[in-house]
Amino acid sequence: MKLDRGQIDRFLKQPDQRVAAVLIYGPDSGMVRERGSLLTRAVAESLDDPFRVVEMTNDQVKSDPVRLIDEAQAIGMLGGRRVVRISGASDAISDAVESLLEQHRNSEHSLVVVEGHELASKSSLRKLFEASPHAAVIACYHDEAESLAGLVRGQLQEAGFTIARDALDYLSQSLGGDRGVTRSEIEKLILYKGDDKSEVTLADAIACIGDRAAFALDDLIDAVCLGDLKALDRQFDRNIVETPPIVMLRSLARHFLRLHPILERLRAGEKAEQVYASQRPPLPWPVRQRVERHCRIWSPAALGLALQQLMETEALTMRQHALGAAITRRGLIEIAATARRLRERAR
């Protein structure tokens, strides 16, 4: 069964005893790891108890599927329910998982937690879990601004901090590509504040998060939208170290989707100040400056074509994972070339 958003938090805290195996997958690898860890702690009360937690990789399961079944059916030496945790899962282990789901239906002694990257709807691994009455599926997509704001506020509150509205808006716009990176960046902000328990301000957020070079996609998106091919090449090389190609494509798509209604309103004759001031969530000043620059170059029609190109690039990237970085770079360069032509035409 596939768990919806309302069921996921409850399941992570108290897993259904009828479920013998769980697939956690999605483009947000940080969220996949976090939810896998929450589920492991809920069942085994620890992440590293050698008697109750067994970790396996995709390759280990593929080469020795019998071991997976043996580990799943083993009874804990010192009692307590065990967790068999598989990382980097792909369709390559579908046969092994199919045998597991056929034989491991008694969840009394152990829970199998399978963690994977983004899996298409046609994925054999997804289909196995979705069809099994003894399994659950948890999808992990990137935090949107609303849910990200709650995540940021909650982590800061746990550390004893409050946050100003404009600072929260800035962080909601700047973070969210990966749950693990987001938590790491907020932890960096907490360390930056130290013993100063005053409210986190916009200046604090910009000073601490504003230079997250390897993690931020702001500069990459800006380079694409302005048609700056040299900057695009530099920012792509910097971000590809930590950021999956799909995250880059979807971040740019979200930016275009936000630009589109703004451009429509500006083309309809609304005053620019009114259009920008009415955005929800509000645009922090650095973000607004970039948006204004981009709106002077792009048109709604050009954005529509660029969005279609992003969808095609993403589909090709998902089909050819090994070439994902090269395909994504080429797609971004083509869109940046369009921006350059638009900019030259507008002069």
Image (cartoon, rainbow, N blue to C red):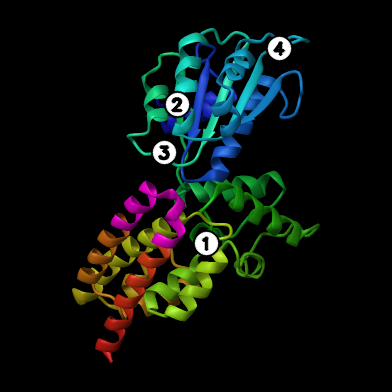
Q: Position of residue 181 (x, y in %)?
A: 60, 52
Q: Secondary structure at mark 1?
A: helix
Q: Position of residue 317 (x, y in %)?
A: 38, 53
- Gap in angstroms between the C-alphas marked 3 and 1: 26 Å
Work out whether residue 292 can be spotted: no
Q: Which mark is residue 94?
A: 2
Q: Earlier in the sequence, mark 2 or mark 4?
A: 4
Q: Earlier in the sequence, mark 1 or mark 4?
A: 4
Q: Quadrant of residue 127?
A: top left
| Mark 3 neighbour density, 10 Å: few (under 14) some (14–19) many (20 or more) | some
Q: Secondary structure at mark 3?
A: loop
Q: Which residues are magenta?
A: 312-327
The type of residue carrying mark 3 is Leu
Q: Earlier in the sequence, mark 3 or mark 1?
A: 3
Majority secondary structure of magenta residues: helix
Q: Earlier in the sequence, mark 2 or mark 3?
A: 2
The type of residue carrying mark 1 is Ser
